Amino acid sequence: MRLRFACRPRSIPLQPIHPYFCYLYLLKLHETMYLRPFIASIIILLALPRVFSQNQPPSLRTASYDMQVRLDTAQKKVFGNEILYWKNPSADTVRELQFHLYYNAFKNTESTFVKEQGGFGLFLEAMKEHCGWSWMDIQSMRDEYGNDLTQQMHFIHPDDDNAEDQTVLRVPLPRPVLPGASIRVELEWVAKLPRSGMRTGYKREYYFMAQWFPKVGVYEPAGTRFAEKGQWNCHQYHANVEYYSDFGLYNVAITVPKGFVVGASGTLMGTKEAGDTQTWTYQAEDVIDFTWTASPHFVEVKEEYKGIQLRLLFYPYHLHLAPRYLTVIHDAIDFCAEHFGPYPYPGLTIVDPPLHGTFSSAMEYPSIITTAAVCVLPQGVKTPEILIAHEFVHQYFGQVVATNEQEEAWLDEGITNYYEARIMDEYYGSQTSTIDFLGFKMGNMNSNRADFFGLSDPQVSEIARTSWQFKEASYHTITYSKTTLLLRTLEGMVGTETLDEIMRTYYERWKFRHPGGKDFIAVANEVVFQKFGPLFGENLDWFFEQGLYGTGMCDYAVAAIANTPKPDRAGIFKGLDHCVQPVTDTTEEAYHSVVTLHRLGELRFPLEVRIQFEDGKTITEQWDGKARSKEFSYEGTTKVVSAEIDPEQKIYLDKNFLNNSLNLEPERAGVRQRVFQFMLWMQQIMQSISVFA
């Protein structure tokens, strides 16, 4: 073993190497060599980024790819030559690689994906066209030493023991990868494209290529997320699940028929024609994936916005929607830059699939996202805007902060959905940001309440559940909408500014890395305690324990308001012969007033309670929300006429805002006042119906 091999393996193209890998390698040497002082000195020097490069990449670039691929539109296949450069990110000796072969999920009816998806129906249309099942076949695999790895590779099924599932490939290595060292693997493969597959495939002359190549899994060093020891995290392809990958550098040359327009992750480095084909070459730096699309019918709109190269691809009949797309992406860029930091990539491609390409709609990949629209979509129906805002936020949470959506989907989908609501409500109105059409109005945040509380059983699952284990089609609603309401409740408790500080700190600390739920909670605890001290307890574990890991519901109610006339002071007090008589000629009665509150649900949150008296005086009480019943008592010459729990609706997980308040009509009120109160109640009821319908 030689030092130069550890810091820049001879098989890897010259590029900046992160000091972390050299540290691991030298640490291993430290255990076996006599020159410990010398090695310790070198470790210190290598910790200085200047020694390596003034342009140190922001990620470890654990898995990088060079690929040359050719799309055969006649056979509906992609032919690929791929070189994987994989760096061992751990202190372990790694003796095998594991790969995702996602297209095999669409190979037959027995794959785990098809079984979880609900059967054969999705693929009936595909079967009508030349047995349109999909597959991926690795024809050759060799390491840098010339070892043929093909003979030893075999399929595994770590999640469900489904022997028919072929979406995870295990490849034993004749020469293991030492701590911090690297391996180069060359692959030749062919993929048959799915016809209208889930998120990927083709239909007519529209191609969308997502999870389309053999992709190495993630080796998690001990201490990463749930890993107690170093391990491969390479799940089968499940119907609800999206993806989890390591960061890397991608150089991809895509050959398509001449006349096709290609959009992809990263930056277009150039095009070259040869006969009846054209090759588009892209480079994507520090990304977790590479996705591309192609069609001869694409038209494009280009624009530079605040240094970001924007590119819109759609069919000609959607060209009139370009101003809507550009408006919302400008808003999303501005919002995210202000709240999290600058957009980390040089460009962004927005794809609006044709109607027959909706299988690829509403998805996010590094620097390329998809939306959905129809030609006659009214301006007041904000579907394209919602999707663009959502998928752009994913560039921060999901792509740069690369959480594992397979195991903790709330960390990217839930956080993203919350900020989608924030963006839409801020720029399009809190009552109109989802729809404002023909008199029907609904805001984005309110639509999440309707979605979650509209479930037949909102308690069917906790948020923190592995994605493929959700039951009764609850994955989307629980992961997206309930998490949004939980974060909105946290915002109500600690304030918008503090919530945004939590997210900004979390993003800065974990960008280009793989955090888990415990890491997010640790940031929240840190920021909130710095701002408020022990106001909410030693930490917020109690909040996340019930909100993420429990299924309880939240429901607070004002149960009763009682105003009892207080009798005059009368009786024997000072001496047996001194009797105090009640005052009979007083013009002002005294009252003992009691407001009774109930906690009807299981969740407990601190609350404000607004009490209003007959004379117009208002006071705000604080309640920790823990007891099943709580009373506030008052004595005076004026009655309590109304009480309202959480008057600013901070606790957005409260399932019923209607029972949060109770009003008593003052006795002196006339008929006109009673009619006005009745109309106000009816208005509140109608508004609630519109939200929950």
Image (tube, grey):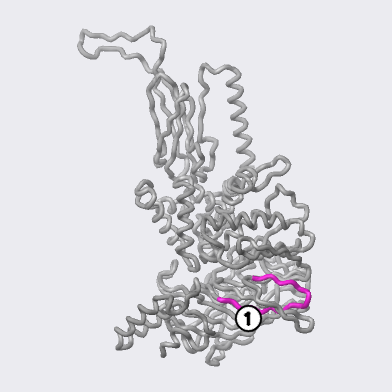
Height in image: 443 above or below 675? Answer: below
Q: Nearer the viewer, residue 386 or 359?
A: 386
Percent of width and height locating residue 318 = 76, 59
Q: Nearer the viewer, residue 114 or 669?
A: 669
Look at 20% across and 11% down and name the residue there.
Answer: 575
Q: Is residue 256 magenta?
A: yes
Q: Residues within 10 Å of mark 1 (few under 14, many from 20)?
A: many
Percent of width and height locating residue 57 = 50, 74
- Horizontally, residue 393 falls left or right of residue 608, namely right
Height in image: 687 above or below 408? Answer: above
Look at 78% across and 71% down and name the residue there.
Answer: 296
Magenta stretch, residue numbers: 249-264
Q: Identity of the amino acid at label 1? A: Met
Percent of width and height locating residue 518 = 43, 61
Height in image: 46 above or below 596? Answer: below
Query: Which residue is tagged 1?
Result: 67
Would residue 508 be seen by someone viewing this image from the given angle? yes
- Horizontally, residue 298 falls left or right of residue 629, namely right
Q: Nearer the viewer, residue 586 or 366?
A: 366
Locate residue 583: give its quadrant: top left
Would residue 552 be seen by someone viewing this image from the given angle? no
Q: Secondary structure at mark 1?
A: strand
